[in-house]
Amino acid sequence: MKGGAVSALEFDRSTGSLKLLNQQPSFGAAPCHISLDRSGKYALVANYSSGSLAVYPLQPDGSLGEATDLVQHSGKGPDPNRQEGPHAHFILTDPTNAFALACDLGLDQVLVYRFDLESGRLFPHDEPFASLHPGAGPRHLAFHPGGKYVYVINELDATLTGFAWDGKKGSLRTIETVSTLPEGVAGPKSCAEIQVHPNGRFVYGSNRRHDSIVIFRIDEGSGRLTLVGHESTQGKTPRFFCFDPAGKFLLAANQDSSTVVTFRLDAETGKLTATGVKAEVPTPVCLAFAA
C-alpha cells in the first residue's frame, strides 16, 4: 500500500502467530502511534511526518473499517530541524472517553479534541490545546490512574511536564516542568516513553541519549514531582518501556543494543533493580503484553 498504512492482525493464542486481517491508508506520512478508545470501538492514529490524525471503526471480526475522520494540524515550532511543521506523535482518549489528547512535537502543543463515540469524529474543543515551552517537543503522555493529572514527556529538551486535567471541562492546567536528566549532564538530549505506575505513586520516563529511566514520586494532592533517581537501562537508546500486568516489573526496550532488559520494581520506593534477565531482540521499539 502506497504511503502510510494501518493494519489489523489476528492473534492466535494457541500458537502465538499473527494473521493479517486488512489494511487501511493512514492518510498521512509516517504513522507512528495507534491507540484504541476506551470503548474498544475505534482505533486512533497519529501520522508523524504529515502532522495529522485519523480515526477508524473496528469491525466485528477485528478488521478496520474506513476512516471516520481525518484531522490535519498546522504551524511550526522554533527548532528548524525538528519543528519545521506539525508532527503528531501520540493520541489517546481520556478516562471518560469524551476527549482525545494528541501530542504534536512540531507545535509544542497537546491538542484537545472532543471525541464523538457515535460518529467516530474528533472536534476541536473550546480550549483546543495546552502549550508547552518553546522547543520542548512533546512526544507521549500518560494519565494518572485517578484521572486528575496528565504527564507529558518532551523529546527535544529532555523534560517532563505535569498538568492538572479537568475531565468534565476537558482542560489542562500546567503544574510544573522538570528535567529528566541528572544535573550537569551535557550534550544531545532525547526522551521517548512515559508511564505512570498503576499504583499512581510514581511516573517513569526514558532518556534515549543518557540510556536511563528517570523516576519521580507523585504527590497525590498536588500532582507535583519529586526526583527518586535514574536507573541505567543496561543498553543503548531505550525507546520504549512498560510494566508487566501486575506492576511488579519494568521491561526496557533498548533499540540500538537490541536488548530487552527486565527490572524488578519496588512499589514503596519506586526504585528499579535489574533482575539479570536480558532478551536479545532485534531493534526493539515497542512492547505489549497479550491480554
Image: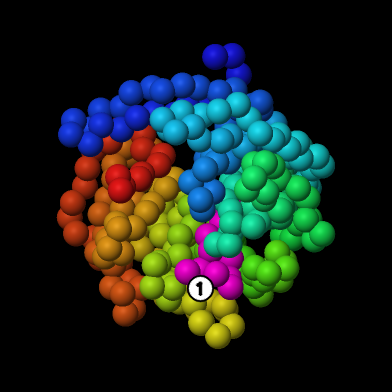
User: Looking at the image, which residue is at 37% across and 54% down?
Assistant: 242
Q: Which residues are magenta?
A: 139-150
Residue 79, picture quadrant: top right
For the residue pair 221 and 206, the one nearer the viewer reads as 221
Disc 1 on helix, strand or loop? Answer: loop
For the residue pair 163 and 108, the one nearer the viewer reads as 163
| Above or below, comparing residue 105 to residue 264 in the picture | above
User: Looking at the image, which residue is at 40% across and 57% down?
Assistant: 212
Specify the color scheme: rainbow
User: Looking at the image, which residue is at 58% across and 66% down?
Assistant: 150
Q: Position of residue 60 (x, y in %)?
A: 44, 33
Location of the N terminus by quadrant is: top right
**Residue 78 in magenta stretch:** no
Q: Is residue 187 visible?
A: no
Name the side, left or right, on which 45 lies relative to 273: right
Q: Position of residue 214 (x, y in %)?
A: 44, 64
Name the side, left or right, on which 196 lies relative to 27: left
| Above or below, comparing residue 83 to residue 221 in the picture | above
Q: Position of residue 10 (x, y in %)?
A: 35, 30
**Mark 1 neighbour class, 10 Å CA radius: few under 14, some 14 to 19, many 20 or more:** few
Name the side, left or right, on which 94 lies relative to 126: left
Count of numbered tags: 1
User: Looking at the image, which residue is at 34% across and 51% down?
Assistant: 252
The amino acid beneath tag 1 is: Gly
Name the side, left or right, on which 173 lies relative to 32: right
For disc 1, the marked residue is 146
